[in-house]
Amino acid sequence: MTNYSDRRFSFGEGIEYALKKLIFSDDIKSAFHADAQIIECAVLKAISSFDPMLRSTFKNFSFNASYLDGIRIRLSNEFDMHVKIQLDCTLIPTSVPNRPGFIFLRASDSNDLKCVKYFDSEGYFVNRVAVQRWFLDNITAVLPKLQNICCNSGRAYSLEYKAHGYGLAHTLLATEHHNPRRQISFDFVPVFVFEPHQWPRNQLKYPKGNHQWFAVPCQYFDRSETHDPRSFIQCAPRWEHLVPHKKQNIKDSLCLLKALRNANEMPGLANYHLKSIYLQATDEKLANWNQAPGRILIRVSKF
């Protein structure tokens, strides 16, 4: 076993040391996962009971991003969840001019849905801001009922809402009653699910495979005056999981990039944005993924 005490690191040794500090063991991950599943179900059950309309549109949820890839850092106690929504109307994804990766969701009609709005003479569209407000209103309404969630482990948790202001997710923090240092963070992301044939034809080619893809509420990345409440970003989570699958050097390099993001307090660089850099580099063969994680990190940082 490498002894790191009282000696200077080489670049490779420093990367190895950082990774050992960042990644949790499988046993710790498993314990957090068991509690997290119960808490997630309690939240969704409470929201569905409070709002019959949301109950009728909620179809399922799934793990996303770092947890699915096995690259969650510091971090087994952080979970990203896709909450799948299906509205009682037909949705047609349409490309946004000069906005690669962004789409609008045109609706056949409103059906008195809170998140479908009429936009001038263009017709009905899903309003991203209304979707997020809908979730926020429901979460804040049921929070008082989520202050004693009991898990099979014997631990009990209380929940609080931690808004981060970037419009992608609703962050909830669970704190264990008898050990306040034990916390689990959840990012609940409402998404709309589509089949491969619904991928807009004038967008970049659909990722390999025959897997569903999501429309995720997301504002444009530039000036606020250009924002449109109809904007969603395309996300293909199954493909995004398969790309780094069995490529440990990619996972470790992305883990390092996230740690740099956290250390420099740049929360606006969402996990999805960072991973997109690696996905693009993989698709365009811009990096040698057989290199050491530190070397990959240097290469990717130049994209």
Image (tube, rainbow, N blue to C red):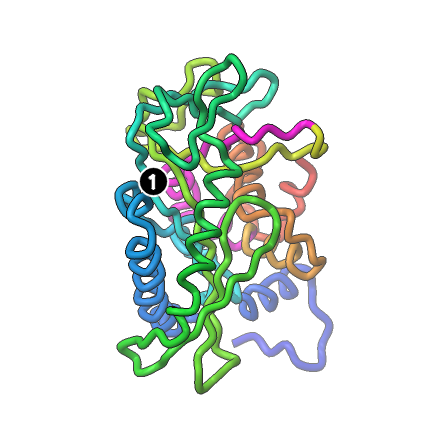
**Residue 148: x percent and y percent?**
37, 76
In the depicted structure, whether residue 234 falls above or below residue 272: above
Name the quarter where the C terminus is drawn: top right
Mark 1 nearby-residue class (10 Å; few <14, some 14–19, many ≥20): some
**Residue 85: x percent and y percent?**
34, 40
Please tell me which residue lies in front, 42 or 199.
42
Residue drawn where x is 28% and y is 31% of the image: 88
Looking at numbered disc 1 in the image, what kind of residue is underneath it?
Ile
- Residue extending farthest to the bottom is 178
Please tell me which residue lies in front, 223 or 7.
223
**Residue 293: x percent and y percent?**
57, 52
Residue drawn where x is 30% and y is 41% of the image: 57
Helix, strand or loop for disc 1: strand
Residue drawn where x is 47% and y is 84% of the image: 179
Q: Quadrant of residue 151?
A: bottom left
Please state the extent of the stretch shown in magenta in the rendering.
Answer: 226-253
Please tell me which residue lies in front, 139 or 111.
111
Q: Does 132 sit left or right of 212 as displayed? A: right
Residue drawn where x is 69% and y is 32% of the image: 222
Q: Does 42 sit left or right of 22 as displayed? A: left
Q: Is residue 80 magenta?
A: no
Give the residue number, with chain letter if any, for mark 1. Answer: 85
